[in-house]
Amino acid sequence: MLNYAYPFVPELTIFWYVMSFISGTCAGSFLNVVIYRVPADISLITPGSHCPKCKKEIPWYQNIPLISWLVLRGKCANCACKFPIRYFLVELLTGVLFVLVF
C-alpha cells in the first residue's frame, strides 16, 4: 500500500541504501588496514596509507574505496606495484553486507 502522505519515501529509501553501501565500503577500507597492520604489529594510525613496495604515501584521491582500485587497475600510481584483489573484495563485500543489514 502506498503512503500518499509521504510520496518521497521511496527516493529516501534508495538514498539510504546508497549511503549504507558507501559507509560499508569505507568500513571495508578500514578493515583492510586492520587485516594488514595488526598481524605485522604496525600502528593503525601512523604511517598513513602507503605503497608496500615504494613506501610512497597514497593521497586521499587515490584512496577512495573501490573506485581508486578500479581506476588504478589495482596498481600503485607511483611504481605500478600490484595490490592484491583482496583489498577490492573486502571493500565490496563489506558494502554489500551493510546494505543487506540495512
Image (spheres, grey):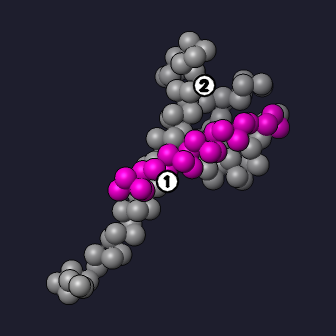
* Residue 28 makes an appearance in the image: yes
- Between tags 2 and 1, which lies in front? 1
Viewer-proximal residue among 23 and 96: 96
Viewer-proximal residue among 68 and 98: 98
The structure residue drawn at horizontal position 44% and vertical position 62%, both measured from the top left corner, is 18
- Residue to which mark 1 is pinned: 96
Left or right: 27 as drawn, with respect to 49: left
Between discs 2 and 1, the one toward the N terminus: 2
Q: Quadrant of residue 14?
A: bottom left
Measured along the vertical axis of the image, is residue 15 above or below residue 57? Answer: below
The residue sitting at the top extreme is 41
Left or right: 9 as drawn, with respect to 91: left
- Residue to which mark 2 is pinned: 36
Query: Which three-letter amino acid code belongs to the residue tagged 2?
Result: Tyr
The structure residue drawn at horizontal position 62% and vertical position 45%, both measured from the top left corner, is 89
Magenta stretch in the rendered image? 80-102
Residue 86 x %, y %:
66, 38
* Residue 64 makes an appearance in the image: no
Question: Which dot marks residue 51?
Answer: none
Residue 13 counted in the magenta span: no
